[in-house]
Amino acid sequence: MKVIEAKNIKKSFENLEVLKEINLSIKKGDFAVVIGKNGSGKSTLLKIAIGLLLPDEGEIKVLNYDVKTKWKKLSKEIGVVLTNERSLYWKLTAYENLDIFGGIYGVKRNIKKEKIRYLLEKFNLTQFSNITVENFSTGMRKKLMLCKALIHEPKVLFLDEILNGLDPEAVYEMIEYLNELNKEGLTIFMISHILHGFSKNTDIYFLKDGSLKLTTKFGDIKEENKNIYDYFRDIIKSE
Ligand code: ADP
Ligand code: MG
C-alpha cells in the first residue's frame, strides 16, 4: 500500500513558484528524509501533505485519503511535528500537555494514562512529567512534541526539522528513536538539514528548483561526502 502518493503538485505564493512539479510515492514502512536549502519549499510540501495548505494543481493522497477533501479524517491517523515549539502549552506540564492532546486526538480515557506513561518513559521524560514546558530545553520540547504526535498511534509521522536546535547528543538520541519507530513499522516523512545516523535504507530526497530532483539511499552516501549539498551538486553536474 502507498502511504503518500503525490502527482504533479504545484504551489505558488503570488508570483513565487515554490513547487513546480512534485511527484512522490512512499510505501508503508519507508523512512523518507527530504533535504534542500532554506526557502526551497520543504515545509510547503509537508503542509500540503497533511492538508494544512492546498496545492494549486495536482493530486495528493495520504493513507488513501484524498488530502484535499478528507484532511479531517486523515488528521486522526497521522502524527505531525511542525517547527513551532509553541504548539505545546508552555504553562502546563508535560503530562498535562499529553493529556489534553490525547483527548483532542480521541485517545480513550481508560488507556490514555497508560499511553502517556509509556511515551514519557520511552523518551526518557518520566522525571520531567510534572515540569512545565516553559522550563524545558529545546531537546526536551522536541521529544515531547514527538510524544504528542505519537499519542494516538498514527500510521505515518510527518516531521519538520525536528533535529534543529538540538545538541549533537540529542540529535543522536532523536535519530535513534526515529530509527526504532521505523523498525516497529511506522512510516516516516521527515525534513532535515542533518544527515547522519540514519539506517542505510533511509531514502534521501532532494528538493531543488521546485521538484524532488534525485533520491538515494542513506547507505549509498559515501563517508567522505561530508557536505551533503556538495555531494548532490556533484551528482547533478555529472548527469
Ligand atoms: P523551506 O521549508 O524549504 O525553508 P518553505 O516551504 O517554508 O521553505 O517556503 C518556500 C518559499 O515560499 C519561501 O520563499 C517562503 O518565503 C515562501 N512562503 C512560504 N509560505 C508562504 C506563505 N504562506 N505566503 C507567502 N510566501 C510563503
Ligand atoms: Mg521549512
Image (cartoon, rainbow, N blue to C red):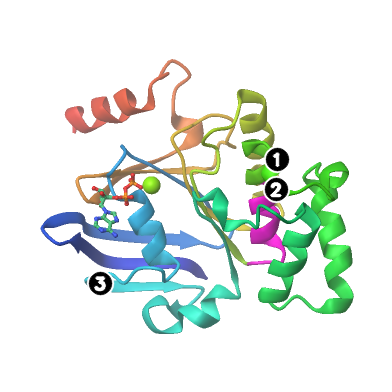
The residue most toward the front is 91
Instruction: Name the residue beneath numbered marker 3.
Output: 58
Tell me if 224 is positioned left or right of 77 in this view.
left
Mark 1 near mark 2, Cβ–Cβ under 8 Å? yes
Which residues fall within the magenta stretch?
A: 143-154
The amino acid type found where label 2 is placed reads: Val
Tell me if 57 is positioned left or right of 129 in this view.
left
Image x and y of residue 48, in percent: 37, 65
Secondary structure beneath label 1: loop
* Label 2 – label 3 distance at C-alpha: 39 Å
Q: Residue placed at 41% from the left, 76% from the top? A: 67
Q: Nearer the viewer, residue 33 or 12?
A: 12
For residue 128, what is the image quadrant?
top right
Image x and y of residue 163, in percent: 55, 38
Label the magenta part by its dominant secondary structure: helix
Secondary structure beneath label 3: strand
